[in-house]
């Protein structure tokens, strides 16, 4: 076995020892004394083990330039690259021209990377890919802290959850593997693809200022601040949205508003329940208000529902039944042979409206019933007078805009 001459570091770390090389040649390179090691090179420093096809060590600095099948091992960590550098003073291994690091929990791959042995920290950059459990991360750079099982990805971050077939994008991701928790910032967006019964691709897009993912126990994703939700049949705004993938539900808080086809719904809180990705129930608690826009014969009118609690039931993507409880009131416009025929205003303790093909079929009012019919000759031109307290038709319904479409298309292409 050949041992390198003692090269003590400024920090007082132990030397790198050569366990094996097929040949060793002393050289002067750029005025510095060096040794060239060729063939089956094996070196160690404390618990760190380095192997490669050939290496050049500069005796003054102690740096070792590695080439060919470079492998650096430190306890459970294995770092591989075609070329690299090992600095015994900094106890740092660098990989170049395509590097990977595997510690049994995560796999990191990039064009360049560094691993700091004493700090148990890795920094990878340029086309970074990370795999762990059911998720894959792409980014421009990533720092991995082994002791904390924490990673920080920055720049063009993409996270794919293969279990849910969704992607979260943003500019910065903090991920705590041991806690099954992550936080995305920097204009985050959640994109989920689903195939409808007729084979069409249905895309769910969610944007907010912050997104958090909890992957253990009752799995959930939380969108925080200025939340926008868009799907083919559903749009929503809220200050806070919580998604429960296992329960197929979306919980909206802080001034939530939901749109479904031509209907707008708002209240203190709104819970949306789905079955197999199809809308099944919208549950509104506190100051519940629903408005449906009717455009007929050039008239713009609004059917309205208000109460303390509202439940909207859907079957096969169509509104099937609405129940209103406590201070329940409805305003429903009438048409006969496609001609406007006034409106009915009804109130009571409870109102149940049943629909057929999206149109009201029956209205049942229970307790404290009051009703009013307004004929067309009185209603026309005075529609605003019959709007319920709290009426507001909003024009800020979120939609998938051109930049969103570009991002969705890019994400879809990346993960095919």
Image (spheres, helix red, strand yellow):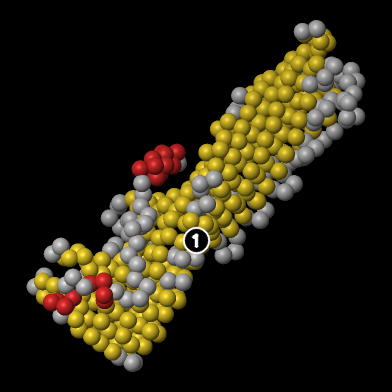
Q: Nearer the viewer, residue 69 or 219?
A: 219
Q: Is residue 264 left or right of residue 158?
A: left
Above or below residue 350? Residue 152 is above
Q: State the residue position of label 1.
A: 239
Say if 316 sits above or below 181 in the image: below
Could you say which is closer to the camera, residue 169 or residue 398?
A: 398
Is residue 3 rendered to the left or right of residue 95?
A: right
Q: Few, some or many C-alpha atoms within 10 Å of disc 1 (few <14, some 14-19, many ≥20)?
A: some
The image quadrant where one finds the C terminus is top left
Quadrant location of the N terminus in the rendered image: top right
- Residue at image location 45% in from the left, 75% down from the top: 285
Rendered image quadrant of residue 384: bottom left
| Residue 103 visible within the image | yes
The residue sitting at 30% across, 91% down in the picture is 369
Relative to 253, 217 lies left or right: right
Q: Residue at x 67, y 41 (%)?
A: 144
Q: Depth check: give the residue in front, 383 or 160.
A: 383
Give percent across and percent down for residue 156: 52, 38
Label 1: state its secondary structure: strand
Q: Nearer the viewer, residue 413 or 347?
A: 347
Q: Quadrant of residue 236?
A: bottom left
Can I make out residue 109 in this image?
A: no
Residue 126 at x, y percent in the picture: 58, 31
Residue at the farthest left position: 337
């Amino acid at each position: 076995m050949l041992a390198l001459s003692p090269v003590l570091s400024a920090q007082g770390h132990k030397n790198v020892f050569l366990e094996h090389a097929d040949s060793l040649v002393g050289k002067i390179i750029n005025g510095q004394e060096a040794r060239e090691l060729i063939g089956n090179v094996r070196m160690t420093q404390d618990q760190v083990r380095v192997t490669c096809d050939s290496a050049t060590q500069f005796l003054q600095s102690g740096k070792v330039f590695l080439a060919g099948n470079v492998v650096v091992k430190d306890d459970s960590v294995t770092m591989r690259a075609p070329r690299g550098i090992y600095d015994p003073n900094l106890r740092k291994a660098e990989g170049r021209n395509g590097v990977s690091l595997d510690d049994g929990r995560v796999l990191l791959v990039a064009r360049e990377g560094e691993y700091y042995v004493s700090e148990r920290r890795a920094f990878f950059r340029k086309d970074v890919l990370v795999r762990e459990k059911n998720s894959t991360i792409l980014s421009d750079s990533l720092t991995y802290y082994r002791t904390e099982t924490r990673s920080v990805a920055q720049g063009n971050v993409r996270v794919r959850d293969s279990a849910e077939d969704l992607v979260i994008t943003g500019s910065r991701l903090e991920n705590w593997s041991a806690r099954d928790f992550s936080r995305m910032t920097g204009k985050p967006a959640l994109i989920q693809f689903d195939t409808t019964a007729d084979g069409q691709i249905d895309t769910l897009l969610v944007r907010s200022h912050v997104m958090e993912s909890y992957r253990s126990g009752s799995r959930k994703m939380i969108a925080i601040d200025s939340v926008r939700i868009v799907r083919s049949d559903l749009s929503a705004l809220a200050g806070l949205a919580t998604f429960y993938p296992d329960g197929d539900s979306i919980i909206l808080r802080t001034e939530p508003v939901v749109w479904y086809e031509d209907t707008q719904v708002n209240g203190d809180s709104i819970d949306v329940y789905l079955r197999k990705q199809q809308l099944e129930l919208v549950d509104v608690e506190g100051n519940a208000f629903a408005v449906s826009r009717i455009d007929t014969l050039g008239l713009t009118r609004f059917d309205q529902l208000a109460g303390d609690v509202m439940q909207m039931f859907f079957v096969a993507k169509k509104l099937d039944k609405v129940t209103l409880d406590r201070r329940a009131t409805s305003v429903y416009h009438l048409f006969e042979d496609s001609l406007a025929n006034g409106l009915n205003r009804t109130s009571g303790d409870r109102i149940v409206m049943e629909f057929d093909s999206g149109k009201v079929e029956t209205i049942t009012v229970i307790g404290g019933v009051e009703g009013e019919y307004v004929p067309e000759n009185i209603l026309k031109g005075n529609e605003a007078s019959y709007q319920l307290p709290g009426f507001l038709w909003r024009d800020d319904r979120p939609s998938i805009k051109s930049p969103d479409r570009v991002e969705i298309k890019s994400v879809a292409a990346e993960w095919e």
